[in-house]
Image (cartoon, helix red, strand yellow):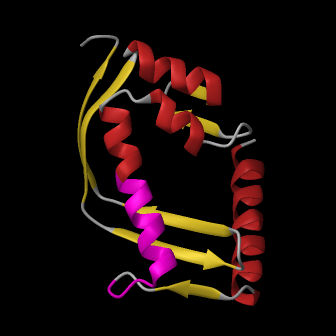
Amino acid sequence: MKSLILGLSFFSMGILSASAQTAQVNSSATNPTNAEQEIITLSKDKWQWMADKNVDKLAGLFDDKAKFVHMSGTWKKDEELDIIKTGSIWYKQADVHDTAVELFGNNTAIIWIGPISMIQATKGE
């Protein structure tokens, strides 16, 4: 079973790598374009909105089909917003030390962030 999962993982990475090579990629961590800078700023704002528990702004940012993967599970948009609103997971402070953006065409971006220094509380602790 492990070898099957490992094999599928490598297969998926190969497909992603091949398609990424054919896409027009614009990545410039040191000198971002206006579009890249706008995405970087929005990403930083998102972390602040999470710290502030501002679910109204987050609701407008997250797509209805978005999935949120955590160590304890995967949630849909409404579940994630409820977790933030109730403080089940509270990202009190997140300092993102490095961000890069890759743009693919006119409507797809991958945001690479990390490392992150974070202060968070889980279920009040």
Task: Give the vertical position of 103 relative to 117 (above or below).
Answer: below
Q: Position of residue 17 (x, y in %)?
A: 69, 78
x, y percent for residue 105: 72, 80
Count the marks: how many? 0
Image vertical order of residue 26 relative to residue 64, above or below: below
Is residue 7 visible in the rendered structure shown here? yes
Name the residue: 30% across, 33% down: 51
Residue 123 occupies which quadrant of the picture?
top left
Q: Name the side, left or right, on which 69 lies relative to 65.
A: left
Instruction: Judge left or right: residue 120 versus residue 54.
Output: left
Identify which residue is drawn at 43% across, 86% down.
28
In the rendered structure, the answer to whether residue 88 lies left or right of residue 22 reads: left
> Bounds of the magenta span?
30-44
Residue 116: percent from left, percent from top: 28, 52
Mostly what secondary structure, the magenta segment? helix
Residue 44 found in image quarter: bottom left
In this orientation, which residue lies closer to the viewer: 75 or 15? 75
Can you give x and y, in whole percent of width and height, for residue 88 in the image?
A: 40, 15
> Measured along the vertical axis of the image, is residue 112 above or below residue 124?
below
Instruction: Please name the residue shown 55% across and 26% down the image.
Output: 80
Q: Quadrant of residue 19?
A: bottom right
Instruction: Give yes or no for residue 3 being in the magenta stretch.
Output: no
In which quadrant of the rendered image does the N terminus lie?
A: top right
Taking the magenta stretch, the answer to whether it contains residue 37 is yes
Residue 76 appearing in the image: no
Task: Look at the picture and state if 48 lies above or below 13.
Answer: above
Which quarter of the rendered picture does the C terminus lie within? Answer: top left
Residue at x-position 30% and y-position 67% = 98
